[in-house]
Image: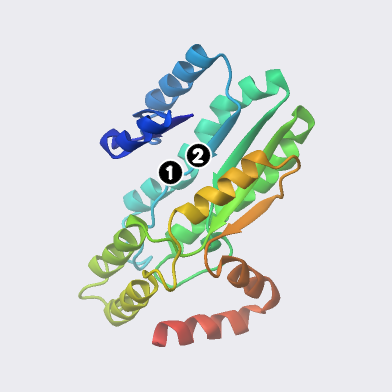
Amino acid sequence: VYAVARRVERMASLESRGVIPFAMDVTDDASMVAGIDRIVTEQGQIDALVNNAGYGSYGPVEHVPLEEARRQFDVNVFGLARLTQLVIPHMRTRRRGRIVNISSIGGKLYEPLGAWYHATKFAVEGFSDSLRIELAPFGIDVVIVEPGPIISEWNTIARESLVERSVGTVYEDLARRMAVMFERVDTPRLSSGPEAVAEKVLKALEAANPAARYPAGKGARALVTARRLLPDRAMDAVMKRTIAG
């Protein structure tokens, strides 16, 4: 098992479990190409790819610079897509492999001030669904994991960005109410630890016939089901009440 990230020092504890960590930046094509080449050279094959890189960039569409919107897509969508492109030939030649894309319940739900983040996760859902049919004839499975609220840096980054980009604008009051909501959710009572995602990733990798998607963590399945059943107006009303506190 190889684990890649920009901040390699944070993966030091994985080495004792036999994991091989090294640096990779999903916004740097040369970094991704070199990383996949290294794994193939050392192991001769790639059995599975888990695309987990991502972050939540929040703020009013009116005030979020397009440069930041593009970075959000670069990390959450195009990095995932490029790594997928790089592993497909190796899996297709062997006629076996599994690609697990970490999406979010945010790929089904939506929030004000989160348009760019939700756009990336909706994109991951559509990309993965199309790819699943595209690669099935070659023995390659594509699985989506949809985490709900998870205790991690994600919440802090999203919360800080939405407030920072809304200060002094007509969206400031909404941003502060949403920040309170985010902070309220970021507790063990309402959010799961990252282990909840890891368990679903393992299930997706080990299942003989994996499901197309696996909700992960507290409330994830219920929220995805509610979105499927509720009409848009009802979902809008639920979101407004939630933000209002």
Can residue 124 be seen by looking at this rendering? no
Is 237 left or right of 213, judged from the image as shown?
Answer: left
> Residue 142 placed where, x, y %?
66, 41
Residue shown at 55%/34% (left/top)?
A: 49
> Residue 8 placed where, x, y %?
30, 33
Give the label, 2 or 1, closer to the camera.
1
> Residue 94 placed where, x, y %?
70, 19
Within 10 Å of the Cα at label 2, are there few (<14), some (14-19), or many (20+) other Cα atoms? Answer: many
Give whichever of 185, 126 is nearer the camera: 185
Q: Residue tagged by mark 2?
A: 80
Residue shown at 39%/57% (left/top)?
A: 56
Is 37 left or right of 222, judged from the image as shown?
Answer: left
User: Extreme left residue here?
Assistant: 168
**Pointer 2 and pointer 1: residues touching (CB < 8 Å)?**
yes
Tag 2: amino acid: Leu
- Which of the numbered marks, if any, corresponds to residue 53? 1
Residue shown at 50%/39% (left/top)?
A: 80
Within 10 Å of the Cα at label 1, are there few (<14), some (14-19), or many (20+) other Cα atoms? Answer: some
Tag 1: amino acid: Ala
Residue 7, placed above or below residue 179: above
> Residue 90 placed where, x, y %?
62, 20
Residue shown at 59%/64% (left/top)?
A: 108
Quadrant of the rendering where the C terminus is positioned: bottom left
- Which of the numbered marks, if any, corresponds to residue 139? none
Residue 152, placed above or below residue 182: above
- The picture quadrant where one finds residue 188 is bottom left
User: Extreme front residue here?
Assistant: 16
Report the Cα–Cα distance between label 2 and label 1. Answer: 8 Å
Judged from the image, the secondary structure of the residue bearing numbered disc 2 is: helix
